[in-house]
Image (cartoon, rainbow, N blue to C red):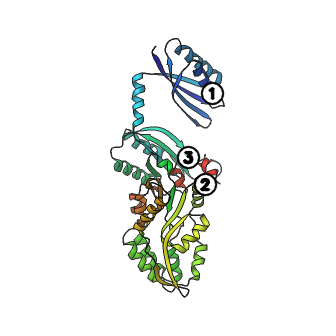
Amino acid sequence: MKNEIFLLNISGQDKPGLTSSLTAVLAESGAKVLDIGQANIHDTLSLGILFEIESGVNSSPVLKDLLFKSYELGIQAKFTPITLENYEKWVTLQGKDRYIITILGERLSAEQISMVTQVVSEMNLNIDAIKRLTGRTSLVNKEEYPRASIQLSIRGKIEDKTDFTKKMMEISRSLDVDIAFQEDNIFRRNRRLVCFDMDSTLIQTEVIDELAELAGVGAEVRAITESAMQGEIDFNESFKKRMKLLKGLDESVLQNVAEKLPITKGAKRLIDTLHYYGFKTAILSGGFTYFGHYLQKKLDIDYVYANQLEIKDGRLTGGYLGAIVDGNKKAEYLQLLADKEGLNISQTIAVGDGANDLAMLNLAGLGIAFHAKPKVKDNAQSSISSIGLDGVLYLLGYHDRHIDLVE
C-alpha cells in the first residue's frame, strides 16, 4: 500500500513532555520519523517532525489525533503534505558540502546578520541551522565584558571560496563584526592543538619594546618592531637590529617586566577551557623564552618555543642563542608539535597578529588573526578583532554553558 509523507510543524509555549506526547501519538499509528528538529527561543517552541505513514486508514486518524493532542497541550499544529519527489530531492542535498559561519561581536545587530545571510542566499546556499553560542544578554545590568556569537550551519556548493571570503571580509570591515568561515568536516570537530603567538596575542604588549624603553632606545626599537609586524622588513633582519640596541641592559629588569606582563582579555578563560576538554597548547614566539616560560607557568601552557637571550656577567650581550624563531620557524614548530602529538595538521589551530605569524596561520587547520595588522587579517582564514581571546572557543563551536563548566 502507498505511504504518505507529512511535515508536522508545532509552535507555542514550551513545556515538559510535549515531544514525548506527540511522538507517542505517531508511535500508536506505526508512523516512521524521517527527520526531527527543535528550537526554543524565550520559552517559545518551534518543533518540526517529518514522518511517513500508511495512507488511507492510518493517515486520517493520526492527523486528527495529533490535532487533538496539540489542542490539549495548548500549542498550534500545522500539517504539510510532502510528495515523494520533493522528499527524494531533499535527500540528495545531504551529499552537499557543509560549512560553518561564526559571527562574533560585542553586540550583534539585525543589519550584520542580514548582510551575512544575504551573501549566503546570493550563493544559493541553504542555512540548515542557526545556533546562539553566547549566553543571553541582560538589558538592565551592564556587562563588564559584552560578547555575542551565533553559528550558522550552511550547505551547498561554493564555486569560488575566495570571492565568498572576500565578501564576508567586506562586511566585517564595514559593520565592525568578526565573521569566520570554515568547512564543517571531521577535523573541525576533532582539533586538539592550539598554538599562540605571544607578544600582542597572549599578552597586550611587545616585550622587546618594553625592554628597549628601559634601555633608553624605545623609539628606535618600536619603529623597527612596527615595520616588521607590518611585513615591511624581514623579521630576522629586524630582530638582529633590535637585539644590538639592547646590549648592556641589566638582567635584573627581565623579572620586573615579566611580573607586569598584561595578559590579554579572555586568555585564561580560553586556555583553562582548552585544557579541560583535552587540548594541548603552545607558545610559538619571535619573542623570548624568558617571558614564554613565565607565561607557561602562569597560564599552564604545554610547550614553549621562542628566542633565547644571550646574557653574560648579568647583562644582555645584544646577541641570542640558537636559531632565530621567525615565521618559517613557527610553522616548522607547529608541524613538529602536530607530529609529536600524533595529529593531522588539520587538527591544529594557530593564533597570531603579525606578518611573521602568517606561515603558521596558513599551515594550521584553522588560522586565526587576532586583533591583527591589516595585511595579516586580509590573508588569514579567520579573524577576531571585536572581543577577547576566548572568542576562539566560539569558532570551535563551544557554547557558554560548556565554558561555564570550567569556570
Q: CA distance from mark 2 to mark 3?
A: 18 Å
Say whether disc 1 or disc 3 marks the residue closer to the N-terminus: 1
> How many other residues sit within 10 Å of disc 2, few (<14), some (14-19) or many (≥20)?
few
Looking at the rendered structure, the secondary structure element under dot 2 is: helix
Q: Quadrant of residue 314?
A: bottom right
Quadrant containing the C terminus in the rendered view: bottom right
Is residue 148 visible in the rendered image? The answer is: yes
Q: Which residue is mark 1?
A: 20
Q: Amino acid at mark 1?
A: Ser
Is residue 262 visible in the rendered image? The answer is: no
Q: Which residue is mark 3?
A: 133
User: As drawn, is 383 to the left or to the right of 272?
Assistant: left
Say whether disc 2 or disc 1 marks the residue closer to the N-terminus: 1
User: As drawn, is 153 to the left or to the right of 67?
Assistant: left
Say whether disc 2 or disc 3 marks the residue closer to the N-terminus: 3
Q: Residue 223 appears at what percent x and percent y? A: 43, 75
As rendered, which of 37 and 325 lies closer to the eye? 325
Q: Amino acid at mark 3?
A: Leu
Q: Residue at x 46, y 49 (%)?
A: 187
Q: CA distance from mark 2 to mark 1?
A: 34 Å
